[in-house]
Image (tube, helix red, strand yellow):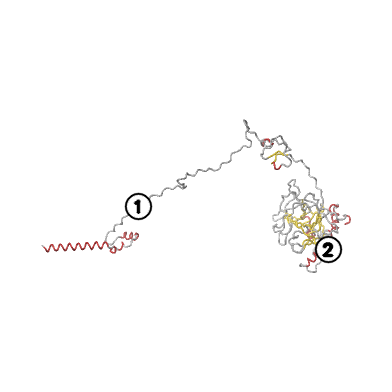
Amino acid sequence: MQTHALFNLLVLLALGTLSAAREKRQADPRNDPPFQVRWNADLMESRWARGPRGGAPPRAPTQVNPPPVPPPPQVNPLFVPPSLPPPPQVNPPSAPPQVNPFPPAPGGRPPQPENTCNPPNRCVPAQQCKEGVVAANRQPNAPPSARGCPGLTDVCCRDPPATTPKPYVPHCGKRKDSAPPTTQKLTSPSNPPVITVPLASDDATSGSESQFGEFPWMTAILHEEPSAQGRLQYVYLCGGSLIHPQAVLTAAHCVHNYLSDYKGLRARFGEWDTQNEDEPLPHQDRKISKVVIHEAFNQRVMFNDYAVLILDSPVKQDDHIDTVCLPGPRTNFAGRRCYVTGWGKTKKEGHYHDVLKKIDLPVVEQAWCQESLRKTRLSRFFILHPNFLCAGGELGKDACKGDGGSPLVCRDPATNHYVQAGIVSWGIGCGEQNIPGVYADVAKASAWINEVVSKHFAYPRRYWSEEAPDPERFY
């Protein structure tokens, strides 16, 4: 019996020892199963899909739901602080109220605007009335309807007295310092109206643009040619000057190739902007009926570079078209400051001009001119022909290519009229310092010019300068 009790006591002690050891082992984390050491949800999921060998898949871990997150509060896109009222609604500005310039009369309908300004008077803005406001028994603060004109700023202005323009009196050498008055906008009957020249440029280093009609004798000599499209066009050849209503003076080297083919030549008068017809007065075109070249003209060395073109009909002289005066045979222009005009280039590598240019130049002594030209490629043995005169020698101021035949004119201090001193002939370069341009001396050819013109027309005294002798002496 005692033995049996002792055995039971030993069994109970053993069981207690085993239970204590089991509890100690479970409390130690080192004794956890291997898959519980490192938590990997993906790995665990794959393992659970296969399950351990020889047994059912382990129970899935308990899903623990996080505490619910309350939704964010609704926020008004236009934040308005609680302490401030919402912004007021702003409406776009409305059109200003219509104000009746004629307020209603007390107890009646508003007066209607009435035009009581009768011809020949006229309603114009007050600042444009130069002839005086028509007198009326009106108060200064009277409504507009009482002023005779419906406009708020209009007044009834006296009509200017009709004036008949005085007929133009032709006279040679009258330079216009300002544009002539415009009485009407006219379109030239010529066709085609525009001159074909090389492209213009703004690289001008010499001279400046002339005013419309400033040099009324200036002539553009053109040649009629078909364009690439088969249309008729006028090609610019050179310049010239009107010396008689039916005669033009130019350089022989410009037209000597047209002695037998002059029917294609045209002379244009009153031209200013070659690419624009919108000018105060119209130009006039004339055909050439004859080309006369000085019999002693030498094409190789340019001696006696004179030519006269006879027109098929006289031009109508006007404010912008008139003749230049011619000098007597003994006129000396050395020391005077003169003008050369043309549509040619302003420097050797430049371009032609659309608008007529003017260049002021000094006429220099022939001896100084010859010495200056000897320092160029002409060599120290060069001799200047006595039928030439020189002008220029100032840097950047010279006639140039395209100005051939154009006039060099000088003011006669006794009459204030302009006399033609030279015809653009040739030069070394353009606008170089101390190298003047060379011109055909018109005074040296005055007898020949008079002879040619007088064979075709009466040559009255007014086409010569005051210092020239009577034309009969040149026969």
Quarter holding residue 364: bottom right
Which residue, given by chain and number where applicable, does mark 2 sit on?
386
How far across and down, in percent of the image, does residue 469 sit?
87, 55
Q: Is residue 99 left or right of residue 265?
A: left
Q: Secondary structure at mark 1?
A: loop
How far across and down, in percent of the image, does residue 352 sit?
72, 58
Which residue, given by chain and number where applicable, does mark 1 sit on?
67
Numbered circle sitting on residue 220: none
Quarter holding residue 262: bottom right
Q: Amino acid at mark 2?
A: Pro
Residue found at the far front of this picture:
83
Tell me if label 2 and label 1 are in contact, CB under 8 Å: no
Q: Secondary structure at mark 2?
A: loop
Residue ID at (44%, 48%): 75
How far across and down, in percent of the image, does residue 460 sit?
86, 52
**Can residue 345 be seen by looking at this rendering?**
no
